[in-house]
Image: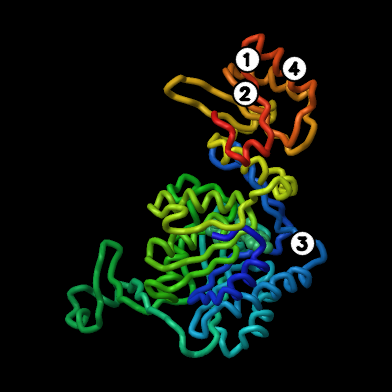
Amino acid sequence: MICGDNLKALDDLQKQGVKADLIYLDPPFFSNRHYEVIWGDEAEVRSFKDRWAGGINVYIEWMRERVVKMYDVLKDTGSFYLHCDWHASHYLKVMLDEIFSERNFQNEIIWSYKTGGLSEKRWARKHDTILFYTKQDNFVFNVIKEKSYLDDTFFKPWQKKSKELGIQQDNKGMFRLVSPRDVWDINVLHPHSDERLGYPTQKPEALLERIIKASSNEGDLVLDPFCGCGTAMAVAHRLKRKWVGIDISPTAIGLVEERLEKLGAYKGKDFEVIGMPTTIAELRVLEPFEFQNWVINEMRAKQSKRLTADKGINGYYEKTIFTERGGIQIKQSDKVGRNVVDNFESALRRGKYEKGFIIAFSFTKEAYEEVARVKREGLDINLITVEDLLLGKVKI
Ligand SMILES: C[S@@+](CC[C@H](N)C(=O)[O-])C[C@H]1O[C@@H](n2cnc3c(N)ncnc32)[C@H](O)[C@@H]1O
């Protein structure tokens, strides 16, 4: 796992001579939206920008720089799948023809799904496009036959020839096994699916499974340079492929770690994570929600529900043995003062917490004095600097 801009990460991979058998990418789209999604019942506010000032040309040039590097790390026999939608698929296809050559275009796969929000103004937009390219004619393609159901007014099971024609039957009707088409009906993740991690653009594993099974073999290397919460990594791991995942968001990388642990793959043993923020300077410039997620992760705590967060508690922990509940407030700033302590004290008392932690880069003298007073009044508030957290000095 590499945390960072894939522009640089791809350069590093190339310098190390890494060659991928399969590249799948699902980049942020040109859609002028700004995601801000609360997930589950915890207020894990996550957002990532897919807003591109400067219009489509800026977006395409941003993508081109990266795809050229992907082309370089792709093996000559490798396959490349770019996942996009109607916003930019036509521009991206022209760009890919230029890089891979139109001769090496293989398919425009339509992933068709049903979701709510059907338009009455035009045909509802219910598909994504996946552009499949290779570098030459010789590439891995494992045909995975699928069921194609027949109209049973023409094929009765008792017809003599049905066996010869390879016709079989299951509870849905009669079918023949055929090579898969380029239109795929795969359900999007159900809101209550076990697979769902809450990452705004998480893709279903069934989609990745098709691509990885068809275009790689066991032991091959799968690369996802915009890996999000790691759908491609999880499927590659399950299907015994090697993998490299890149994402610029430390929150995403943290999620992939957890996801892989659930599959029995552990950091330090089965995979490495590089590029996560490790210095004060790096933490200072993180996006606010990334900083908050980083602190919560480091403290092994949980995100507060949104309502509580609005009232000054960003995270909390519960110790079941001593039934201790602690609240956490996070400030990505310096010289945090007495007023923050006072407000936090009220929030803790309101929420009946026994202990509290404020995390910031530094605190004023008055803040420490105020904490001493609050302690004398029976509430244990602790001021923690980011440096102490980085050094692993904090125990909750
Ligand atoms: C559409 S999401 C990918 C979702 C993924 N397919 C999944 O199933 O979870 C796009 C991802 O690209 C990441 N990203 C955006 N710009 C990036 C960059 N320059 N380098 C690496 N990752 C980037 C975002 O953080 C986001 O997680």
Residue ID for mark 1:
379
**Residue that numbered label 4 is attached to:** 370
Question: Is the C-beta of the residue carrying label 2 under 8 Å from the nearest atom of ligand 1?
Answer: no
Residue tagged by mark 2? Answer: 356
Which badge, 3 or 1, comes first in the chain's sequence? 3
Above or below 364: residue 290:
below
- Which SS class for mark 2? strand
Among the 4 quarters of the image, the one containing residue 366: top right
Few, some or many residues within 10 Å of mark 1 (<14, 14–19, 20+) = some
Q: Which residue is mark 3?
A: 52
N-terminal-most mark, 3 or 4 = 3
Which quadrant would the C terminus be assigned to in this image? top right
Q: Few, some or many C-alpha atoms within 10 Å of disc 3 (few <14, some 14-19, many ≥20)?
A: some
The residue carrying pointer 2 sits among few (fewer than 14), some (14 to 19) or many (20 or more) residues within 10 Å by Cα, namely: many
In depth, the one of 27 and 192 nearer the eye is 27
Mark before the other along the chain sequence, 1 or 2: 2
**Residue type highlighted by circle 1:** Leu
Residue farthest toward the top in the current orientation of the protein: 377
Sequence order check, earlier mark of 3 and 2: 3
Task: Give the mark nearer the N terminus: 4 vs 2.
Answer: 2
Amino acid carrying label 4: it is Glu
User: At which x and y percent is residue 35?
Assistant: 67, 50
Amino acid beneath label 2: Gly
- C-alpha gap between disc 1 and disc 2: 8 Å
Residue 212: image quadrant is bottom left
Contact, CB < 8 Å: mark 1 with mark 2?
yes
Q: Ligand 1 is found in which quarter of the picture?
A: bottom right
Marks 3/4 in contact by CB < 8 Å: the verdict is no
* Observer able to see residue 34: yes
Contact between marks 1 and 4 (CB within 8 A): the answer is: no
